[in-house]
Each structure stands twice: as structure tokens, then as C-alpha cells.
Image (spheres, rainbow, N blue to C red):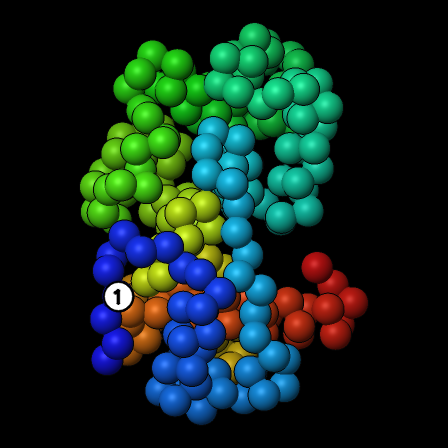
């Protein structure tokens, strides 16, 4: 199997290469490519604002999280940790933050402003070190780290096994009688190394296509 350096970021060229490998490995992936075309590379700017947005996306719809994030950006012109910390609980609750999300996002902002966390250094670290570093913060678990690794740092071999949309997509694609658990997803996806982040993009692509065809989010 093709090997790639762990710290290499996904590019359009490596996305194309990975799609070819996955299509040869799995006929269902080949069918997605044939019917829907390649998935978007889907990237986000690394940094505080993106990580905060991912925290907002925990266990809610992307649309709901985006609405809160948009309102936040409306009252904080430049979303830095320092500027976020100037907002009190009442202001944050008024734009849709839950008590827990206030706690988590304030903890993230505090960790950055006090020097406990330097997000700019993560791109130089391996996945295990990044996971350890971020999970020290309350409210940041594996799913949040996975999405940041996959979207912001563009790591090619990350699969968010706790992602509901991916589990739903894989169940439908493989015609499974039950939705795969995170533990089952971890086993299933081993076969797709070192391109699991591309497999995730293919499954999201498939999921969104099915959702859009039904007129839902």
C-alpha cells in the first residue's frame, strides 16, 4: 500500500491519488466516484476560531452551530482568544451558547492566552502528540481532535469514528442491518490506511448527496 509521511498535508494531487487507491480497494467507493464525482477537499483555517467552531458543532447540527458562530462573529469583529474572553456569560447565552460550551470555549481561550496551548505548533507534531495536547482541555475529545486534524491540519489518515453522519453513510453504503459503532468503524476503516481521511470525505460526499436528494440537511 502507498505510504505517505504522517505529517504531510493533503493536497489536490494526493487527494486524487488516494481516491484512486480507495476506488481500487472498495467497489462501493468506486461507485460513489462514478456517480457523484470526487468529494471537495473541505478545508478550514487552522487556529482558535476553527477549533472553537468545531466545539460548537459537538452533538448539534452543523446549521445550528454555524448560526451561533455567525452571531459570535457579529459581536466580535476579530475572533481571537483575547477578544472572546471579553464576553460575559449573558452575552454568550444570548447568541446561543450553552453553559457547557461557554465553559469549553473559555477554557480553550484561556489555555491559549496563558501559553498552555500553542495551536501554531500542532502542524509540526504527530497525531498522537496532538491528540494528547488537545484532550488535556475540558470539552475536547476524540471527535473534536479528529475534525481539527482532518479539516484544519489536512492530515490524510484520520477517520472520525464518532461521527454520526459517517456511521449513517457507511450503514447505507454497505447495506448493514445496524449502524456501526465507533469501535466497529475503527476496525472497518483499518483497510483504508493511509487514506482514511479521504474515505471520510467520500462518505460525507455520499451522505450529503442522499440528504440533499431528500430535501434535508
144 or 47, nearer to the observer: 47
**Number of marks in the image?**
1
- Among the 4 quarters of the image, the one containing residue 96: top right
Q: Residue at x 41, y 24 (%)?
A: 108
Residue 210 on image: x %, y %: 66, 74
**Image position of 44 with respect to 208: above or below:** above
92 or 52, nearer to the observer: 52
- Among the 4 quarters of the image, the one containing residue 197: bottom left
Query: Residue pushed farthest front?
Result: 13
Residue 11 on image: x %, y %: 44, 61
**Image position of 188 with respect to 133: above or below:** below
Tag 1 secondary structure = loop
Q: Residue at x 64, y 12 (%)?
A: 90
- Within 10 Å of disc 1 (Cα), the crowding (few <14, some 14-19, many 20+) is few
Q: Residue at x 31, y 56 (%)?
A: 8
Quadrant for the C terminus, please.
bottom right
Q: Residue at x 49, y 60 (%)?
A: 164
Query: Residue pushed farthest right?
Result: 215
Position of residue 87 in the picture relative to residue 132 (left or right): right
Residue 215 makes an appearance in the image: yes
Quadrant for the N terminus, please.
bottom left
Residue wearing tag 1: 4
Residue 15 on image: x %, y %: 45, 69
- Among the 4 quarters of the image, the one containing residue 35: bottom right
Position of residue 210 in the picture relative to residue 107 (left or right): right
Residue 184 makes an appearance in the image: no
Residue 170 on image: x %, y %: 47, 75
Position of residue 211 in the picture relative to residue 147 (left or right): right
Amino acid at each position: 500500500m502507498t505510504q505517505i509521511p504522517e505529517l504531510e498535508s493533503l493536497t489536490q494531487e494526493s487527494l486524487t491519488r488516494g481516491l484512486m487507491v480507495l476506488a481500487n480497494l472498495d467497489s462501493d467507493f468506486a461507485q460513489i466516484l462514478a456517480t457523484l464525482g470526487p468529494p471537495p477537499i473541505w478545508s478550514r483555517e487552522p487556529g482558535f476560531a476553527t477549533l472553537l467552531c468545531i466545539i460548537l458543532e459537538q452533538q448539534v447540527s452543523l446549521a445550528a452551530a454555524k448560526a451561533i458562530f455567525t452571531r459570535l462573529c457579529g459581536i466580535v469583529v476579530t475572533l481571537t482568544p483575547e477578544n472572546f474572553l471579553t464576553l460575559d456569560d449573558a452575552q454568550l447565552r444570548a447568541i446561543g451558547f450553552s453553559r457547557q460550551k461557554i465553559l469549553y470555549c473559555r477554557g480553550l481561550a484561556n489555555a491559549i492566552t496563558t501559553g498552555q496551548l500553542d495551536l501554531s505548533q500542532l502542524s509540526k507534531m504527530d497525531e498522537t502528540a496532538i491528540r494528547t495536547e488537545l484532550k488535556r482541555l475540558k470539552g475536547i475529545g476524540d471527535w473534536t481532535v479528529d475534525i481539527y486534524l482532518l479539516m484544519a491540519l489536512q492530515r490524510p489518515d484520520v477517520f472520525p469514528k464518532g461521527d454520526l453522519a459517517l456511521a449513517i453513510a457507511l450503514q447505507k453504503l454497505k447495506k448493514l442491518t445496524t449502524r456501526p459503532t465507533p469501535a466497529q468503524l475503527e476496525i472497518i476503516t483499518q483497510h483504508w490506511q493511509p487514506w482514511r481521511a479521504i474515505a471520510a470525505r467520500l462518505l460525507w460526499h455520499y451522505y450529503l448527496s442522499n440528504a440533499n436528494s431528500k430535501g434535508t440537511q
